[in-house]
């Protein structure tokens, strides 16, 4: 794992977007794993700008989102399909048929989960997976006690997650209680992961995720097992990291980061 700290949330999002853009330029057929949430909005804004101003080409790319709420139609403003359409898909030249999210309205959720895994496999697996972290330590919706080898499945949301995400549903009472999420095992199979974390309110949980012991109570700690995972933080999110000087030194001296060093 590598940890990279940038001064501001915007610089952290820019670095994340630059990594995605470079992956897409080197491989136009990239299979890109996507996340939703407030943290990712800045990344998608930058990618849309790169498409509009620099011609970043999504036409051959395939995407798989981490998760979707159960029982919420795609056109509901709280659905993740709606989020992705609004923040990215309708602004770039991606083929909508190559954008995948779990179908939270499926009659048979178990079959839907199994088929989602098959779709990922049939596309050759995910090349680069974008991740955020919830205050409960989840990646995707892998809430505490998610098995570290879990696959795509239905998962009950914690009260904390419900409160964190309730705004788009008009309050916690209207929030769905269940979601379909890629499992921790599914995420660990992606060839590369990039976890973006910004804001002081995430400082405690991300320090546990990066420097604490691996535990299913904090599914993000499983990323320590991943052979190619980068955590990008802003200054506020990095406040509780113990080894910050070492991470900074590595970033400044690793040749493969040379082209990304200046914000
Ligand atoms: C959403 C997802 C979640 C979020 C996390 C952070 O697709 O996978 O794990 O990344 O809940 O959300 P924000 O950025 O809203 O704090």
Image (cartoon, helix red, strand yellow):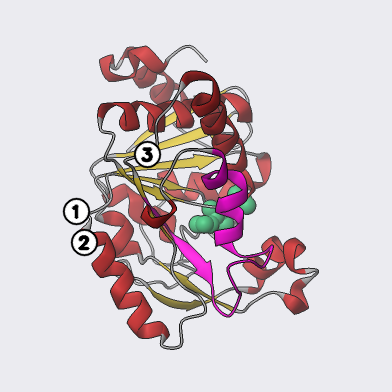
**Which region is colored magenta?**
63-91
Q: Where does label 1 land, which residue?
A: 124
Can you tell which of label 2 and label 3 is closer to the viewer?
A: 3
Expressed as whole percent of the image width and height from the top left, the position of residue 203 reads 59, 43
Question: Is residue 203 something that shows in the picture?
Answer: no
Disc 1 crowd, CA 10 A, few/some/many (<14, 14-19, 20+): few
Q: Kindly report the distance in space between the C-alpha atoms of the residues bearing marks 2 and 3.
A: 20 Å
Q: Quadrant of residue 74?
A: bottom right
The reply to whether discs 2 and 1 touch (Cβ–Cβ < 8 Å) is: yes
Q: Looking at this view, name the residue that lies furthest to the bottom.
A: 107
Q: In the rendered image, which quarter contains the N terminus?
A: top left
Q: In this picture, is 215 found above or below 30?
A: below
Under tag 2, what secondary structure?
helix
* Above/below status of 141 relative to 250: below
Q: Mark 2 points at which residue?
A: 121
Q: Which of marks 3 and 1 is in front?
A: 3
Residue 247 occupies which quadrant of the picture? top left
Number of numbered discs overlaid on the protein picture: 3
Which percent across, then down, holds residue 213? 38, 54
Measured from the top left, where is residue 37 in percent x and y?
A: 60, 52
User: Which residue is the site of mark 3?
Assistant: 59
Q: Magenta stretch containing residue 163, yes or no? A: no
Q: Which residue is drawn at 50% across and 75% down?
A: 104
Identify the element where label 3 is drawn.
loop
């Amino acid at each position: 794992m590598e940890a990279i700290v940038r001064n501001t949330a915007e610089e952290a999002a820019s670095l994340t977007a630059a990594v995605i853009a470079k992956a897409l330029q080197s491989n136009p057929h990239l299979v890109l794993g996507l996340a939703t949430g407030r943290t990712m909005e800045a990344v998608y804004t930058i990618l849309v700008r790169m498409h509009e101003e620099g011609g970043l080409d999504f036409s051959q790319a395939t995407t798989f989102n981490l998760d979707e709420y159960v029982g919420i139609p795609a056109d509901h403003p709280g659905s993740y399909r709606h989020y992705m359409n609004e923040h990215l898909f309708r602004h770039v030249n991606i083929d909508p048929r190559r954008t995948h999210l779990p179908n939270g309205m499926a009659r048979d959720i178990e079959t839907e989960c199994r088929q989602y895994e098959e779709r990922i496999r049939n596309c050759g697996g995910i090349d680069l997976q974008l991740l955020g972290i919830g205050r409960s330590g989840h990646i995707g919706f892998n809430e505490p006690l998610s098995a570290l080898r879990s696959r795509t499945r239905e998962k009950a949301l914690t009260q904390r997650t419900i409160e964190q995400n309730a705004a788009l549903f008009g309050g916690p009472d209207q929030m769905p209680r269940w979601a379909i999420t890629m499992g921790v095992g599914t995420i660990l199979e992606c060839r590369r992961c990039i976890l973006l974390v910004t804001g002081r309110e995430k400082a405690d949980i991300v320090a546990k995720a990066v420097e604490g012991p691996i535990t299913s109570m904090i599914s993000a700690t499983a990323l320590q097992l991943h052979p190619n995972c980068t955590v990008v933080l802003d200054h506020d999110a990095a406040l509780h990291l113990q080894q910050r000087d070492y991470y900074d030194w590595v970033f400044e001296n690793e040749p493969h980061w040379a082209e990304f060093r200046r914000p």
